[in-house]
Image (spheres, grey):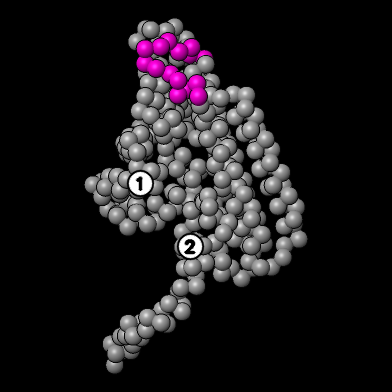
Amino acid sequence: MLRDQRRQPADEAQQLSLLQFLRLHLPRALAYGFYLPWHFSGPILTFADFCREAERPDRLVWKPNLLLLLAWRATRLLVWMLLLQVLHHFLPVGAFLESIRSYESVPYKRLVFSMYLHGQNFMLVYVQLYGWPGLVSSIDGVELPHWPDCISRVYTYRQMWRVFDRGLASFMYSHIYIPMGGSRHGIVRQVAAVAASFAFVSIYHGDSTSVRIWAALNAVHLLLEIAACRLYEWKLKAWLSRRVSPANHQRLVAYIIGFNLAVTSCFIFVFLIGDVSALLFIVEIFKPLLLYRPWWHLFVGLLLTYFTVQLSLRYEECVEAKRKKVNKVCQKIN
């Protein structure tokens, strides 16, 4: 009798007619597929997240500070749009980077400055593409993934995919990476999941030769970062903690991550420039190691990446401390 009772819900689900299934799910699927705020420029929001946002009980409840919040977001977006237009009109760094050839000598400071500015330009474009849809959808009570964080504080590829295009990262994680095994079913399935995720990234961005190379570099470097983090957590972290002070421990980690940041910053330009010749930037950046340029050029560059990593680590510590403080206050209230 118990077995028969357990079978009843499954039998009822199987007997659900096609018409009833469509009546239940089709309206939400159409609303998800044609939701205007993100229909033209994104960002991606998974179907489960969309249903969760759209069916929140307080979605249509008027909030007293909503107009102030909308005005603040719109002001920020307009300021960034103005800065973006200034960059486009007065500092055409993209055209300069596309004109670099392997047989030409490139001024080191101009190259590094142009790469940094072009990366900021790319970020500001995405702020506009994702910021305005998020602003409109917030009027409807649906919160889209936040626009990209400043890439100046991003120092690993894992972090880049989490804070730059949150919607795409969430989609890959929930629909490709986790279903294929992720990190819980061995290294082989994890490598296969990473490869499949970035194969999707390549197709999503047009599947050109430069995009394939960029996606492959992303996948390889991400796997190397995962391996390095596991090695660090397994042996090096405890070993360093016993031999150096916490401050020197963090400095050493920042030095290593700073070198990683200098390399990973070059890979994105294969995608931005749309040409494999962007790999020449890596050669130009590290030419001082081959004695073609004064060594202090590279030293200053790595020193700046070290400062960037230190500031980023400090920023993350402050954010984590603030989050814990808010959680404690919420627990006391509850």
Where residue 313 appears, x then y in whole percent? Answer: 53, 34
Q: Amino acid at mark 2?
A: Gly
Q: Amino acid at mark 1?
A: Ile
Residue 241 visible in the snapshot:
no
Mark carried by residue 33: 2
Crowding near pointer 1: few (<14 within 10 Å), some, many (20+)?
Answer: few
Q: CA distance from mark 1 to mark 2?
A: 20 Å
Residue at 56%, 47% in the rendered image: 130
- For residue 217, which quarter of the picture? top left
Where residue 182 appears, x then y in whole percent? Answer: 32, 51
Element marked by disc 2:
helix
Stretch in magenta:
95-109
Element marked by disc 1:
helix
Mark carried by residue 203: 1
Please name the predominant secondary structure of the magenta segment in the image.
loop
Magenta highlight on residue 163: no
Q: Is residue 74 left or right of residue 129?
A: right
Q: Nearer the viewer, residue 45 or 58?
A: 45
Where residue 8 appears, x then y in whole percent? Answer: 33, 87
Query: Most extreme residue toward the left, as rendered?
Result: 188
Residue 164 visible in the snapshot:
yes
Q: Nearer the viewer, residue 99 or 70?
A: 99
Residue at 34%, 10% in the rendered image: 290
1 or 2: tag closer to the N-terminus? 2
Where residue 105 appears, x then y in whole percent? Answer: 42, 10
